[in-house]
Image (spheres, rainbow, N blue to C red):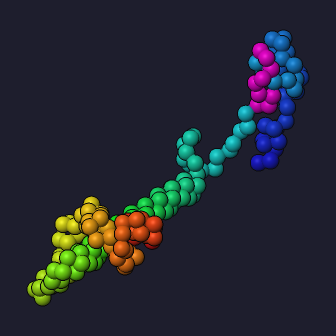
Amino acid sequence: MSKPLARIEAPIPQSNIGFKLLKQMGYTPGSALGKEGSGRAEPVGIQIRRTRVGIGREEPHKEKRKREEIEAERERKKEKNLMEEFGSRQKSQWRSRRVVVNFMKAKAALDQLENKEVVEPKKNEDEEDGEQDGEEEEEITEEDLQELLMKLRGEHQYCLFCGFQYETVEALLSNCPGINEDDH
């Protein structure tokens, strides 16, 4: 088996008829092919295939490994996307719950400042907590909360997040860092 491989890798002798023909056409041994000499200097290597698969196909174990790597990469991407989606969904749910809680606090503070009776929302035992929370989240938006906070600040000089009622609007503006919870 090594004799045919050695013969393939050995250069063509100058006594070869094909080599003589190449020399007559302008080929010089060791130089690259092409007009500018930018082509190949050595011939394309020969690969002896020991499997029964055709040309252009890799060996079965290499193809299987490549398919497994592609599948593993696809699974990693899918898992990463699911994690990101879950995280963003959790954040949005947390934000909407915070809006509802802050709205309820602001409403109670406004009612107390206007000397109204504070009414605690009663939960029905028949309803599930998840259903009631879902309804509240749909009804109360961030705009509603902002509107209520502005009313507290404008009419009563009260900041929900500072938990303090200022004497004047100027005192409120100079001592309170901002309207939103994030500002505090």
Residue 142 in sight here: no
What residue lies at 18% left-to-right and 80% top-to-bottom?
A: 115
Name the residue nearer the viewer: 82 or 20. Answer: 82
Give the quarter of the figure containing the C terminus: bottom left
Residue 159 is a magenta residue = no
Q: Is 96 positioned to the left or the right of 55 in the image?
A: left
Residue at 76% from the left image edge and 48% from the top image edge: 1
Residue 25 shows up from this direction: yes
Q: Which residue is the extreme one toward the bottom?
A: 125
Towards the viewer: 118 or 17: 118
Confirm whether the magenta stretch covers residue 37. yes
The residue lying toward the viewer, choosing from 57 and 129, is: 129
Residue 27 location in percent, x, y? Answer: 83, 17
Counting from the top left corner in percent of width and height, residue 8 is at 79, 37
Q: Using residue 62 as the reference point, say whether residue 134 is left or right of it.
A: left
- Provide the major secondary structure of the magenta segment: loop
Which picture quadrant has residue 104?
Answer: bottom left
Which segment is the magenta one?
35-43
Q: Position of residue 168 (x, y in %)?
A: 36, 69
Q: Nearer the viewer, residue 46 or 172?
A: 172
Image quadrant assignment for residue 78: bottom left
Q: How many dots with numbers?
A: 0
Q: Quadrant of residue 161?
A: bottom left
122 lies left or right of 28: left
Question: Residue drawn 80% across and 31% down?
Answer: 42
Q: Is residue 66 left or right of residue 171?
A: right
Image position, residue 123 (x, y; %): 15, 85
At 33% across and 73% down in the image, what residue appears? Answer: 158
